[in-house]
Amino acid sequence: MTLMMILVFGALLALALPVGYALVISSGLAAITVGEMPSVAAVVKIFQPTQSFPLLAIPFFMLSGNLMMGGTLGKRLIHFATSLVGRFHGGLGQVTVVGSTVFGGVSGSAVAEASALGSMLIPWQKREGYPGAFAAAATASSSVIAGLIPPSIPLILFAAVSNESIAALFLAGILPGLLLCSGFMLTCYLSGRLRGFKRLTEQITLRDILRATVAAAPALAMPAFIVVLLRAGIATPTEVSVIAVSYGLLVSALVYRDLTLRRLYDALVHTALTTGVVMLVIAASNLVGYVLTVESVPTAVAEWTVSVLQSPVMIILMLNLIMLVVGMFLDLPAAILLLGPTFVAIGNAIGLDLVQLGIMMAVNLSIGLFTPPVGTTLFISAAISREPVGKIVRELWPFYLVAVTVLVLISYVPAFTLY
């Protein structure tokens, strides 16, 4: 049954069928024809995860991000980042990295971040004399920080797969996200210094920085606001997501005063479309999980891995390599939901903390977002910059080096995630 599902899934992906449909068809055929599961039961298995209360956090966090990112907030955040680092070597690249980190605390989605920030920052960098490929590389790589900074959609999905605490995962993702931010900023600084990128000549005073900080404060407060509510036990993740929507409405309507009916409509439509794509993958993955569980695949794989590799160091290395390869071909939500059950079983078998495993998966699969052949943020940045993908990939190698270094640290030094 599992073999048939894998073969059909691979064939449908080769035909360029969307991942959600490929999962539904392959798992449905395997369950009904080989596993002799009644078709009604298969439909129930697909429908079942859509009734999950914790997963309601996904559309609400998406909506809060769309509400806040659709107005003048984006410009204020860019001004804030520019006042902090714009005057240094590679300053506009660093602005992209800082902007991505702050936006990550609002949107939780790397794809949304690459689209919103890229459309503003890539043309600006090109006008200031930065190579278009470098601007696209900085945007494609730094956008994935949104997968770690709360409210991270990938971490919510991993929590649904592993039954781990969303609050613990959110807190654990902050330090790795800041490590990626620091490493990418250093990369931009060294590139700007060695290659002579133009520096901003505008004089920035402490008063200018304070003004920019105050203007961007509502967005800067969002991730801290989320973590405090969760860790203090004041609200559940779903309740926090609803509060975040209310917060976004109030900030847009009363602070920035740029909320219009048209922008509200656009935010609702965009949220509905994105949620539909994610929920289709979640629903289909539940049936996939059933097929794997019936044949005890996660347990068998975990036992085989432990017996053959034995060393936890080698097992963690194997997990990382598998995730890096899978992330190059599958969208991040689908990869988490498909690999999650098996990797959780392996993690339990070797005593790996599931919070640490969740952050490893988020970083690993986020690297795939800016890696060919199916890198989503890579192709978004390429489309905005109008630069060849191959040229952008050549600019990405130092960013890959930083990302892999952070991955090694969180994989083998638990303190970076379990602090």
Image (cartoon, rainbow, N blue to C red):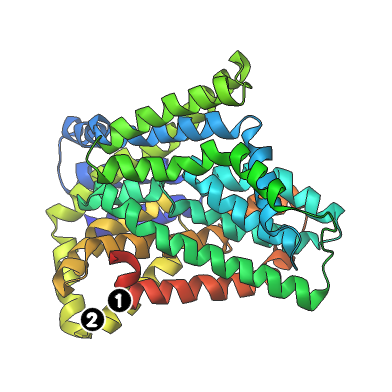
Seen from the viewer's position, the closer of residues 55 and 297 is 55
Q: Secondary structure at mark 2?
A: helix
User: In the displayed structure, would residue 42 be above or below residue 299?
Assistant: above
> In this figure, what is the number of numbered marks?
2
Horizontally, residue 96 falls left or right of residue 192, namely: left
Residue 244 appears at what percent x and percent y? 41, 31
Q: For residue 79, which quarter of the picture?
A: top right
Q: For residue 21, which quarter of the picture?
A: top left
Residue for point 38% across, 55% down: 335
Residue for point 56% across, 18% down: 265
Residue for point 15% across, 35% down: 38
Residue for point 23% across, 57% down: 341
Q: Amino acid at mark 2?
A: Pro
Q: For residue 262, which quarter of the picture?
A: top right
Circle 1 crowding by C-alpha within 10 Å: few under 14, some 14–19, many from 20: many
Residue 235 appears at what percent x and percent y? 25, 34
Residue 340 appears at what percent x and percent y? 28, 57
Horizontally, residue 388 falls left or right of residue 302, namely: right
Task: Work out which quarter of the rendered image holds the C terminus and state it.
Answer: bottom left
Residue 81 in view in this figure: yes
Q: Secondary structure at mark 1?
A: helix
Spatial distance from mark 2 to mark 1, Cα to Cα? Answer: 6 Å
User: In the displayed structure, would residue 248 be above or below residue 187?
Assistant: above
Horizontally, residue 37 falls left or right of residue 260, namely: left
Please say if the residues under marks 2 and 1 sit with CB atoms less than 8 Å apart: yes
Residue at which label 1 appears: 316
Seen from the viewer's position, the closer of residues 177 and 398 is 177
Task: Work out which quarter of the rendered image holds the N terminus and state it.
Answer: bottom left
Q: Amino acid at mark 1?
A: Ile
Residue at which label 2 appears: 312
User: In the displayed structure, would residue 315 be above or below residue 299?
Assistant: below
Circle 2 crowding by C-alpha within 10 Å: few under 14, some 14–19, many from 20: some
